[in-house]
Image (cartoon, rainbow, N blue to C red):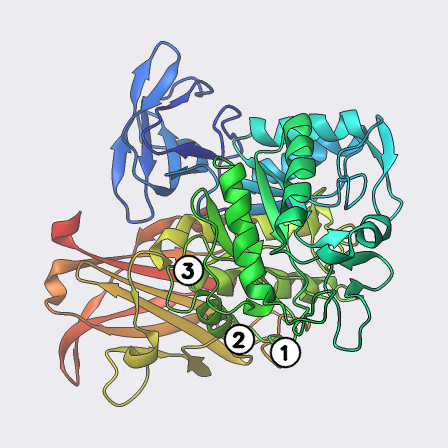
Amino acid sequence: MPQRWFSDLRSCYREGEEVVVADIPDGAARALVRTAFDAVYEGAFVDDGVRFANLPIGTHTMEVRANDGVLMAEELFGVARYVGDDPVMGFVTSFDVSSRASVLAWLRDLRCTVVQVYDWMDSYSYPLPTSNSYEDPLGRPIDRAALKDLIRGIRDIGAVAQAYAPVCAADKELAEEHPQWRLFRSDGAPQSLGDLLQIMDPGNAEWQDHWLSQYSAAADDLGFDGFHLDTYGYPRVALSVDSEPVSVSDGYSDFVKAVRGARPDDVVSFNQVNGVPRGFEPPTSPGFRYAELWPPNDKWRHFEGLLQRSTGTGTRRGDTLAVYPPVWGSDRDSALRTAVLSQAVTTTLGANTLIWGDDDGVLRHPYYVDHEQLHAEERAVALEWHRFGLRCRDLFKVVTDTSWYELSDENASVTVSWNGDTSPEPVGGALYARVMRSDELVVLSLLDLSGSSDGSWASPTKAGGCSRASVDILLDAPERWHAHVAVLGRDDGRFATLATEATSMREGRGVSCAVPLVGGWSVLRLVAKEAT
């Protein structure tokens, strides 16, 4: 990728908003925006730089080229109905002045559009700090002015600053003052998260009023423009102070509606831990669905089922998986491979991932302060994988996933062969193939998981052994289609023309091609010529 990036290009723009970029290199002759589907939108050179209008929703690449066509500069950015839709997630938990520049640099390089600000509050019951220097609920010192400055910086790069906000956490003192707000166990003991916090009834109207007054005041004071509503995956059996059964899922629904009613413009997400409550209706826009992963969902192949359970029969919207690979031991290369593959698998399923953030950080533990910091060369690898996924991600969101009935049986309309196993689900020891189709588009993702012994995001992963795959694809009229391939580790992951040959398949004619794999992930895109 060209080393010059556009310092004034935000991470995300709202639909209908003009995109104006002033940081254009000298000698530029052409500026364009290219979508994942290879549609091109030309920019108009004006006094203040280059202006783009009427760009479609999606993740796009802005390119600036010289007279001879040489690429001079390039950057990724998004267009959304609401800034915060279909998020590119990041997290922050370092609020000191000394780390601000490097934290914001990592978030900007990741092109984050929503950043979860973790454990920023003075206390769970009364989050707004009353002094400039205070401690979070676990005793970590925080400088209020530095926190506000970081939140401002997040918003300046075009991202939403989302306050981490547990929906039913209270300090012991408040819980004891209001036993009618609390939840209790079947043995009569109060529901709690160890000795850290007490668990309140999210459906209790008085608790909602208290929570909204306190967290709204904190958000307005500190500059947050979103909330991540956190839960803990339990209680599964909850009773009131009068020993009456309480529906926690109904309480969550009431709570989310109360937050949306009070904060209509904030970007809201709600944590369905391991997909619970099943089929929960996500916050209305601006907002998205979010699920934190835990065992027994400890394999990559569990991601698809968890996403389906989370959604139920509802609409998927910006689905995001929070993944904390506990793999950072002595073999850092294998740990990093697990992290990047976890995000890549999620991308192929049309969903998003929370895994990167803070100061060159990657999550490894649900207490985000306890994350791993990447070395410089690791940071570069993570960024290469991340940006490759951003370049391709729209291809997995707008067409039909046909993997489970197109691949590899005797009537297969897509065959993928190499010197190992190919699977339509992400299992260890195999080349994971995912097929997406529409009338005018075929997408085939090839992700090398052959270096994984167990197909788990919770285990270290070696580099795979697949360097090339032979692909046959059945098409209605092969001469109508042209092929491009994006190869991680080659040409900065950009799509390039791929030669194909006509071939005969069981049900008719198709095309055959050889897809190279260099870094472990390649995406083949076939578009009908009439669509270009």
State yes or no: discs 2 and 1 in contact (Cβ < 8 Å): yes
Q: Is residue 369 above or below residue 461?
A: above
State yes or no: discs 3 and 1 in contact (Cβ < 8 Å): no
Q: Quadrant of residue 311?
A: bottom left
- The residue labelled by disc 1 is 296
**Coordinates of residue 237 in the picture (x, y in percent):** 67, 74
Residue in the picture at 39% in, 32% down:
14
Q: Mark 3 belongs to which amino acid?
A: Gly
As drawn, is 12 to the left or to the right of 148? Answer: left
Q: Mark 1 belongs to which amino acid?
A: Pro
Residue 302's label in the rendered image is 2
Residue toward you, 359 or 208 = 208
Residue in the picture at 66% in, 60% down:
336
For the residue carrying disc 2, how many other residues have a C-alpha within 10 Å: few (<14), some (14-19), or many (20+)?
some
Residue 350's label in the rendered image is 3
Q: Mark 2 belongs to which amino acid?
A: His
